[in-house]
């Protein structure tokens, strides 16, 4: 097929070259897993596993699908966002400043 999937994160580039028999049609979904992922290599189902190596993931990852001439066919930028967990409190009850008078209205 002449296609490659290139991923750059924190200055490190990982490249996966698709086997010439792998067909990637426009709009199709293909997963490429790191060699140590434990996933099964099933090219007919679009699930591919690297023979060796692994994807590098930092705070920012740029992934490109390129053809044999180096033309970018698709791209994606992924940015890691830190999750913030907070507490919220909900009060259910009567306000004390209005007292019983407030309940009559």
Image (cartoon, rainbow, N blue to C red):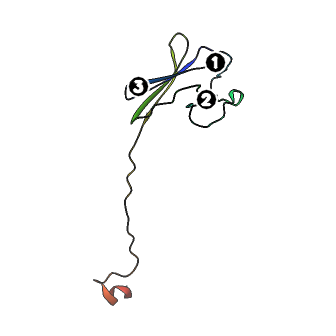
Sequence-wise, which precedes: disc 2 or disc 3? 3
| Element class at badge 3 | strand
Sequence-wise, which precedes: disc 3 or disc 1? 3
Q: Position of residue 83 (x, y in %)?
A: 40, 49
For the point 39% across and 56% down, the residue is 85
Residue of label 1: 19
In the depicted structure, whether residue 70 falls above or below residue 91: above
In the depicted structure, whether residue 89 falls above or below residue 33: below
| Element class at badge 2 | strand
| Residue located farthest toward the right when viewing the structure as drawn | 44
Q: Nearer the viewer, residue 8 or 39?
A: 39
Badge 3 crowding class, 10 Å Cα cut-off, few under 14, some 14 to 19, many 20 or more, is few
Residue of label 3: 12
For the point 38% across and 74% down, the residue is 91
Q: Position of residue 33 (x, y in %)?
A: 57, 32
Q: Quick check: marks 3 and 1 in contact, CB under 8 Å? A: no
For the point 39% across and 43% down, the residue is 81
Instruction: Report how far apart the C-alphas of labels 1 and 2 lie in the structure.
Output: 11 Å
Residue of label 2: 49
Q: Quick check: marks 2 and 3 in contact, CB under 8 Å? A: no
- Left or right side of 19 for 96: left
Image quadrant where residue 4 sits: top right
Sequence-wise, which precedes: disc 1 or disc 2? 1
Q: Quadrant of the C terminus?
A: bottom left
Q: Quick check: marks 1 and 2 in contact, CB under 8 Å? A: no
Q: Quadrant of the N terminus?
A: top right
Instruction: Report how far apart the C-alphas of labels 3 and 1 lie in the structure.
Output: 23 Å
Image quadrant where residue 104 sits: bottom left
| Element class at badge 1 | loop
Q: Position of residue 87 (x, y in %)?
A: 37, 63
């Amino acid at each position: 097929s002449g296609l490659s999937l290139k991923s750059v994160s924190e200055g490190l580039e990982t490249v996966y070259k698709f086997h010439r028999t792998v067909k990637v049609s426009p709009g199709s979904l293909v997963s490429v897993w790191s060699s140590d992922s434990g996933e099964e290599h099933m090219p007919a189902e679009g699930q591919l596993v690297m023979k060796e190596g692994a994807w590098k993931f930092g705070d920012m990852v740029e992934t490109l699908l390129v053809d044999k001439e180096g033309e970018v066919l698709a791209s994606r930028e992924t940015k890691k966002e830190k999750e913030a967990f907070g507490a919220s409190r909900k009060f259910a009850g009567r306000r004390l400043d209005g007292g019983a008078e407030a309940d009559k209205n």
